[in-house]
Amino acid sequence: MRPDAVVLYGPPAAGKDTVTAALTALDDRYVHFDRLKVGANAGAPYRAVSADELDRLQAKGAILYANERYGNVYAVDRPRLDDLTTAGRVPVVHLGQVAGIHALHAEYPARWVTVLLWCPREVTATRARERGSTDVAERLTVWDETKTDLAAAGVDVFDLVLRTDQRPPDEAAVHIHRALTDRTRAVPSVRDKVD
């Protein structure tokens, strides 16, 4: 049987960290997937690697998806997913590109629940400022890129679409948990409006 896994996709400050924390509080099988990172400030919640090490992993076919953003490289690696799923954990992978979703679905045999966490641009700006981000303008540029990416892909890629400016994190976590655990019967899909 394929292991369970979750993808949380969304723009900056959409609540990926907050919803992941709510998931781990709901059920300790959930665990934040700590992506590899090459670049500045490569510490928690990432695993720091050198560019050479990332190249070696890519040459071995261990990298499922990598992207560049904020002047850094981020990667999802098969060995870490294997470690987590073999231990009975449910990895929660944060992504900001639909291409990454397609790569994980194609390359890693799991029962993926794919969730769009959304918030309006002004909410991203407010949240980024409130958490002390010094690069708010850059995060808004990424919000714009995410909106373009989403418009090209459509929401059919997602099992759930949740507006984090309209739902508290614990409610979002419950919807995700139900989508993961109630797969034997039809679960109504939650699709908040994206604008």
Image: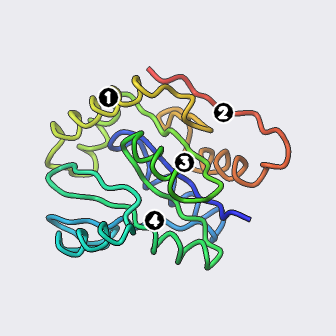
Tag 1 secondary structure = helix
- Of residues 43 and 64, which is closer to you in this image? 64
Which numbered disc, 1 or 4, marks the residue closer to the eye?
4
Find residue 9 and report its image quarter. Answer: top left
Q: Earlier in the sequence, mark 1 or mark 4?
A: 4
Q: Earlier in the sequence, mark 2 or mark 4?
A: 4
In x, y percent, where is residue 15?
Answer: 43, 46
Residue 75 marker: none
From the viewer's perspective, is residue 98 above or below residue 177?
A: above
From the viewer's perspective, is residue 141 above or below residue 39?
A: above
Amino acid at circle 2: Val
In x, y percent, where is residue 117?
Answer: 48, 39
Question: What is the C-alpha distance between the residues marked 1 and 4?
Answer: 26 Å
Circle 3 residues within 10 Å: few <14, some 14–19, many ≥20:
many
Q: Earlier in the sequence, mark 3 or mark 2?
A: 3
Question: What is the C-alpha distance between the residues marked 2 and 4?
Answer: 24 Å
> Position of 148 compared to 160: left or right?
left
- Of residues 159 and 25, which is closer to you in this image? 159
Residue assigned mark 4: 33
Residue 169 marker: 3
Residue 121 marker: 1
Q: Earlier in the sequence, mark 1 or mark 3?
A: 1
Residue 190 marker: 2
> Position of 135 compared to 12: left or right?
left
Amino acid at circle 3: Pro
Q: Residue drawn 44% across and 20% down?
A: 195
Amino acid at circle 1: Arg
Question: What is the C-alpha distance between the residues marked 1 and 3?
Answer: 18 Å
Circle 1 residues within 10 Å: few <14, some 14–19, many ≥20:
many
In x, y percent, where is residue 138?
Answer: 16, 40
From the viewer's perspective, is residue 96 above or below residue 149?
A: below
Q: Residue drawn 60% across and 59% down?
A: 109
